[in-house]
Image: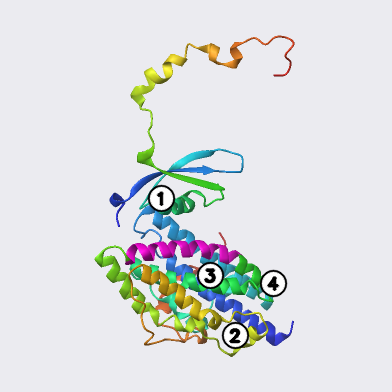
């Protein structure tokens, strides 16, 4: 069996209860079940996780570098979208 | 503890340690030879589970023995005839199908053996088994997957796996036999009586082989000798590699 016949998966690990799953890397496997086992073997060897998600890399729709201008730049000049933009009235303490 | 009983437990622990060490070493031979990176790492993990288990058995045997005996004395300073592992563990790693076939037979075996050992009156052996039983559940999941994939895969993978199963089959018989030492420990509710789950083992292995479109071999031959220290020609070669560094540099630390 060679890597060419395998699919690429992205691996997400939750390191502790209450935290979010974080992307930790990718791996090759035949199917989702095998990907889950390999994720366990490759990414949780040092007790890094309590839960694993695997997703076929092809199933992830990702923004592209070329999209940056139109996706992200427009929010640069909209500081009013941040809570810190607004001065708090004195009456509201410790917010 | 009664001295005779203590000696028997030491021997029993060493035997279980031998099984785990020799199999662990065999699996470790796949490291850097795996079919692809992910499987290579997975094989390494499984090998470490077995080598870790052997350390626990040997350490327990060493503690019972006293006289500054350590796990290393059992692993590195005994010769071929002194090892008492079941022969199936020492068979060469062969091709991937061969290692997979052996692993399935042993994983099903270990799942029963360790579950039973958890009820041992010997608390240390029971604790080692409790740890091992979790590892085994994962090993079995892997080996079952691979048997199904290879057996029901291509014509070549099917044929290779079938001939591996046929070649190994006769070595499974001695897994269920017990000499006088083990029989006495079984009576004392310390050792596991594997003959009790032989039928169940056969049923479970057969079910997986059949699902993988493989034929379950008829038992036409059986080999024994491991527990008496009579080995195949493979063990000597294995020990040469396993013990080489320790024997060249005795007691070195790193």
Q: Which is the main secondary structure of the residues drawn in magenta?
A: helix
Q: Residues within 10 Å of mark 2 (few under 14, many from 20)?
A: some
User: Residue A56 appears at what percent x and percent y?
Assistant: 38, 43
C-alpha gap between disc 4 and disc 2: 17 Å
The nearer-to-camera label among 2 and 1 is 1
Choose between B105 and B50: the one closer to the eye: B105
Q: Which residue does the numbered mark 3 point to in the structure image?
A: B111
- Quadrant where the C terminus of chain B sits is bottom right
Q: Given the image, what chain letter belongs to the residue carrying mark 4?
A: B
The nearer-to-camera label among 3 and 4 is 3
C-alpha gap between disc 2 and disc 3: 19 Å
The verdict on residue B135 being magenta is yes
Q: Which residue does the numbered mark 1 point to in the structure image?
A: A32
Q: Given the image, what chain letter belongs to the residue carrying mark 1?
A: A
- Quadrant where the N terminus of chain B sits is bottom right
C-alpha gap between disc 1 and disc 4: 39 Å
Outermost residue toward the bottom? Answer: B180
Q: Which residue does the numbered mark 4 point to in the structure image?
A: B123
Choose between B225 and B184: the one closer to the eye: B184
Q: Residues in magenta? A: B131-151
């Amino acid at each position: 069996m060679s890597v060419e016949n395998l699919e690429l998966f992205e691996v997400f690990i939750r390191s502790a209860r209450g935290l979010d799953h974080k992307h930790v890397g990718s791996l090759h496997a035949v199917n989702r079940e095998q990907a889950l086992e390999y994720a366990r073997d490759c990414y949780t060897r040092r007790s890094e996780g309590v839960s694993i998600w695997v997703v076929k890399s092809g199933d992830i729709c990702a923004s592209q570098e070329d999209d940056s201008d139109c996706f992200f730049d427009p929010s640069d000049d909209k500081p009013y979208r941040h809570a810190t933009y607004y001065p708090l009235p004195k009456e509201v303490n410790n917010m | 503890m009664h001295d005779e009983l203590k000696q028997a437990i030491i021997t029993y622990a060493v035997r279980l340690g031998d099984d785990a060490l020799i199999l662990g070493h065999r699996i470790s031979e796949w490291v850097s030879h795996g079919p692809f990176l992910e499987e290579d790492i997975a094989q390494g993990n499984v090998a470490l589970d077995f080598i870790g288990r052997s350390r626990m058995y040997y350490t327990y045997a060493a503690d019972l023995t006293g006289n500054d005996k350590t796990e290393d004395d059992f692993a590195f300073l005994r010769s071929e005839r002194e090892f008492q592992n079941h022969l199936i563990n020492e068979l060469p790693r062969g091709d991937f199908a061969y290692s997979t076939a052996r692993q399935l037979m042993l994983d099903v075996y270990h799942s029963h053996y360790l579950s039973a050992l958890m009820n041992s009156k010997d608390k240390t052996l029971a604790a080692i088994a409790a740890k091992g039983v979790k590892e085994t559940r994962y090993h079995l999941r892997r080996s079952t997957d691979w048997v199904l994939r290879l057996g029901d895969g291509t014509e070549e993978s099917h044929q290779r796996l079938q001939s591996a199963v046929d070649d190994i089959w006769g070595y499974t018989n001695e897994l269920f036999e017990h000499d006088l030492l083990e029989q006495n420990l079984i009576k004392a509710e310390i050792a596991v009586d594997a003959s009790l789950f032989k039928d169940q083992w056969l049923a479970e292995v057969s079910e997986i082989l059949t699902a993988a479109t493989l034929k379950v071999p008829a038992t036409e031959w059986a080999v024994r000798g491991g527990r008496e220290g009579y080995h195949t020609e493979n063990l000597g070669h294995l020990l040469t590699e396993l013990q080489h560094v320790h024997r060249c540099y005795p007691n070195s630390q790193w």
